[in-house]
Image (tube, rainbow, N blue to C red):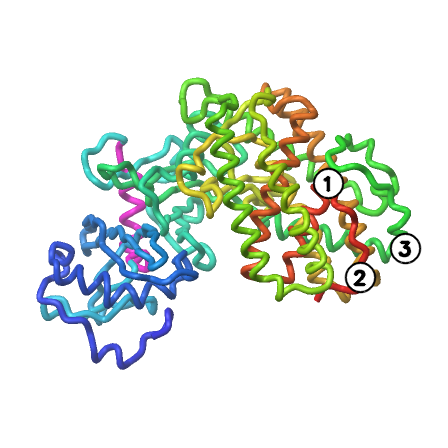
Amino acid sequence: MTENQINADEFQNPFVFNVGWKSAFEDEEFIKVFSSDILENYIINKRWYGGKASTLKYIEVVDSFKIASEKNTYYGVLLEVNFKEAFYQHYFMPVSFMKVEDLDTNTIIAPVKMNGVEGFLVDALHQEDFRKLLFDKIVNSGEKTTLKVRFHKGEKLEEKEYKSSKFMGVEQSNTSVIYNDTLVLKIFRRIYISTNPDYEISRFLTERMDFKSSPAYTGSISVAMSEGNITLGLMQELVPNQGDAWQFMLEEVDHIFDNLKHKKIKICKLPDIELFKRLKLNAVPHEIIDWVGLSIFIRIQTLATRTAEMHIALGGDFHDTAFTPTTYNGDYSVWLKNRLTYQFQNRLNILENNLHKLDGLALELANQFLDHKKDIRKLFLDFDWTKMKSERIRIHGDYHLGQVLVNGDDFTILDFEGEPESTIRDRKVKQPPLKDVAGMFRSFHYSIYATIFNNKEKYPYDQEDLFHAGEILFKYFVGVFIHTYTEVAQAGNLNIGYRSEIDFLLKYHLLEKAVYELGYELNSRPRWSVIPLTGIASIMNFEKIKYSHDTK
């Protein structure tokens, strides 16, 4: 049975239980069959399931809670998925039972007969009654409760009455529901026995700092466990937007490369600059403005301003210890070096195992990377915390163009969950705000190279010339951004250090991000590994590779 299609044969073979739905999760036999025979077939096909690269061993129902509307009984089920590779993940599934005659969705978990009543187990989010129930519980909640499931109404929540609900776009790693066309409730599918950073930061930015450039926090759903609180849902205002900044940047860069042809620009004559050179807008050479245009630089200034304001807010509270700025110390240095040397070794192993998939420039860059692995490792180990005069704060942690919405001439920053590969504890470690800036710079780099790759036939230039133009463009984007960011951050008393420290941290975290990306590209689209490899070569000032053939 596919995800969105009910096979007629399935009606004939329901799972039969001798317990009614209202007592289902008190029955050991039901839980046993549900967690093995039913869920193991269902969960592996879901978009939000993050264990597809591993081998499922067994699923266990860790806990469940009952929540009822006037019409129906629902269960929130907390699952532990165990893998043969000796690790586990936790997931949240709201489950509903619908009688055959009431079924109004194709997304079913399994046909069942509960104490003689035929019907289907379905994901409760596909029932409007359940979505309305969640909305009403948040709207009518108070802060204090002794219940296991806790609903919280945010200070900025003005909506009082449920009108409508619908899913937001395609299902991603979380499931988002739009209410009344004004609010969005993100249900976290993968959960952690700790408060989710997205909830923590969103609520802090809204209710403590009144930060305007991220969606306002309006409510949440959590479960109180003996080990800690688990965040199940985060409700925020729905921000009007024209799409994300990644798509916006791809269109801008495509237009910029089109200009090379239309304006008959000689790439070899374009003025180059060093990476991290600070640039006021009026210091950008007229040849670059003629090629690129002024508007994209103005947009980059706005994005830099919003980024700095985000960091000022995240580092601006001296009461809540979770958000108090802190200095560097030996513990942080050990944590950082251990983390990065482990990640670096992992990428080396992946690269060596995938070398046969590469050719052309990608292969040459990969061999250069392997030849210089000691130099790269040394740079990671060169982090000397005693020389750091700046401060560490809570940061976004997974900051790139896809996490930013275009809102007219402005930008809105979202998704504060942190780096998907990191543990929940690591995501809450205070880090240099320049790590986020480096993440955005890597995203600029990607947007330029993705444009070249996706439009090869469109621009009448050799790939080497396009890459050269791309590197120049990247450095001007970075120069304008870092000038504005530094000015705004320092004016807001955010301690990011002096110039040499800023440049060191940017280089350090650019390298970290590029090495991180390398693993993803080698595993999913080896041809694109040339992008992080080019970034690494540029950051490390490796000798420029002369090549005469395209990457394929």
The residue sitting at 44% across, 45% down in the picture is: 182
x, y (%) of residue 202? 44, 35
Q: Which class describes the residues within 10 Å of circle 3: few (<14), some (14-19), or many (20+)?
A: few
Which numbered disc covers residue 477?
1
The residue sitting at 73% across, 63% down in the picture is: 360
Q: Are marks 3 and 2 in contact (CB under 8 Å)?
A: no
Q: Give the mark, 1 or 3, whose residue is nearer the N terminus.
A: 3
Instruction: Compute the Cα span from label 1 to label 3.
Output: 22 Å
Please tell me whether residue 141 belongs to the stretch shown in magenta: yes
SS category of the residue bearing label 1:
helix
Which numbered disc covers residue 382?
none
**Secondary structure, magenta segment, majority class:** helix
Q: Which class describes the residues within 10 Å of circle 2: few (<14), some (14-19), or many (20+)?
A: some
Q: Give the mark, 3 or 2, whose residue is nearer the N terminus.
A: 3
In the displayed structure, does residue 434 sit left or right of residue 201?
right
Residue beneath label 2, please? 459
Residue beneath label 3, please? 264
Disc count in the image? 3
SS category of the residue bearing label 3:
loop
In the displayed structure, does residue 343 sit left or right of residue 140?
right
| Quarter in which the C terminus is drawn | bottom right
